[in-house]
Image (cartoon, grey):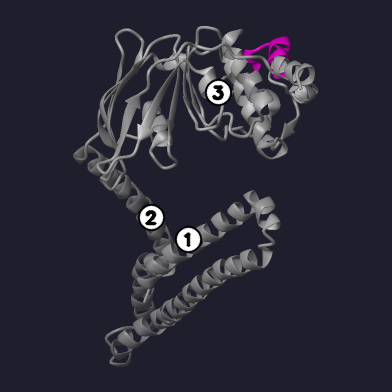
Amino acid sequence: MGRPLIRLNTERYAREADLRFALVRVNESSESVALYSGEPDERRNLDGFVEAVLTATRRLSGALARLTWITSGYGWLAIVVPILAAAPGYFSGRLSFGEMMMVVGAFNQVQAALRYFVDNFPKIADWRSAVLRVATFRQAALDLDDVAAESRRIEISPHPSGWLSFEGLSIALSDGSIIIEDGTAEVRPGERVLIVGESGSGKSTLFRAIAGLWPWGSGTIRIPTPESMMFLPQRPYLPLGTLRAAVSYPAAPGTFDEATVKAALERCMLGDFAEALDRNDRWDRTLSLGQQQRVAFARVLLHKPAWVFMDEATSALDDDSQAAMLSLFESELAGASILSIGHRPGLEEFHSRTLHIRKTKEGAVLLARQPSQPQRIIPSWVHWLHRRLIP
């Protein structure tokens, strides 16, 4: 009667986890839901998750009730059975009343010792279901490692000269389908290289492969020292806490002095937030995506990495803001190597070389365009002056 409790506890935990995830997801996306007027649909979805939790709880309650009947009946039988067993000896005169009570007491002692499992079976079933969930998760992780070990993997190794190079690189999805069939190129220190291609051609997957987050494929990526690299995704990560912690990330908030942090914010057109450095807030919600991207450039300005990898890192910026951010690499960060992924018009003028990911039937191919002369990044105030002086 108690064995189904293991499965029912596992189901209840799973349904509760689904409900918590759905609530957090709606909370994080509340603005988008409101813009689409999708509240009725979200309420219907959440009601479905709540009903699943209630159904699992009802099944568990029914199983506990049935088990309670068994355990309670076992307790009452334990009182009657020893008396019935010893009664014939008492009535036949072989046992005195005191001896019969001794037999009943001995039986109760043994029964009390063995009753632990009967009284605590619901707790044991709950514990077993939790252990099975953890064991299942661990086994899934081990199976994933086995699959990754059996499949082809991209080799990440340090470059002897501190460059970035792709040697016979092939990038695949986890199911084995090829995204990029062949890629061989190199980026030397000080170069500014732009990678362009159609949407879905594998640009962002290449970005993850360079960071070591995408192991599926073959070939070799030789990278400079990890300490000299910084990655700027399209949506920067802003940790919970103060703005100072968000700007200093991944370093500790007190790594940079007050004047340096404020100067970085001012340089990245975030001077209005200089007085809010120590304010705790949900900065990933308070700041717009464009402001968050400028926070990422402020991080670069503080950490001064030798290699910067950007994946659509200026997609939410206007032309003047983009020019102002990229001009960092002409002044404060002059000499830094840049590998950018993007397809916004005007990006090519900020880079000295372009690599093109072209789709083919076999998979995308990384091709090098003829290098052009590096062009200076024109600061945003020059664009402003040009528009006003020249009609």
Residue 245 seen in the figure: no
- Circle 1 SS class: helix
**Residue drawn at x 67%, y 53% as measured from the top left:** 30
Q: In this view, does 35 lie above or below 349?
A: below
On the image, the x and y values in percent for residue 49 come to 55, 66
Q: Are marks 2 and 1 in contact (CB under 8 Å)?
A: yes
The numbered dot on residue 13 is 1
Question: Above or below — where is 189 with respect to 232?
Answer: above
Please state the extent of the stretch shown in magenta in the rendering: 253-265
- Camera-side residue of 345 and 6: 345
Give me the residue at 35% from left, 56% from top: 132
The residue at the far left in this view is 150
Q: In this view, does 280 lie to the left or right of 349?
A: right
Under mark 2, the amino acid is Arg
Comes first in the chain, label 2 or label 1: 1
Mark whose residue sits in front, 2 or 3: 3
Q: Do the residues labelled 1 and 3 touch (CB within 8 Å)?
A: no
* Amino acid type at image mark 3: Pro
- Residue 165 counted in the magenta span: no
Secondary structure at numbered mark 2: helix
The residue at which mark 2 appears reads as: 133
> Among all residues in the image, which is located at the extreme bottom?
91
Which numbered dot is residue 250?
A: 3
The Cα–Cα distance between marks 2 and 1, rounded to whole angstroms, is 9 Å
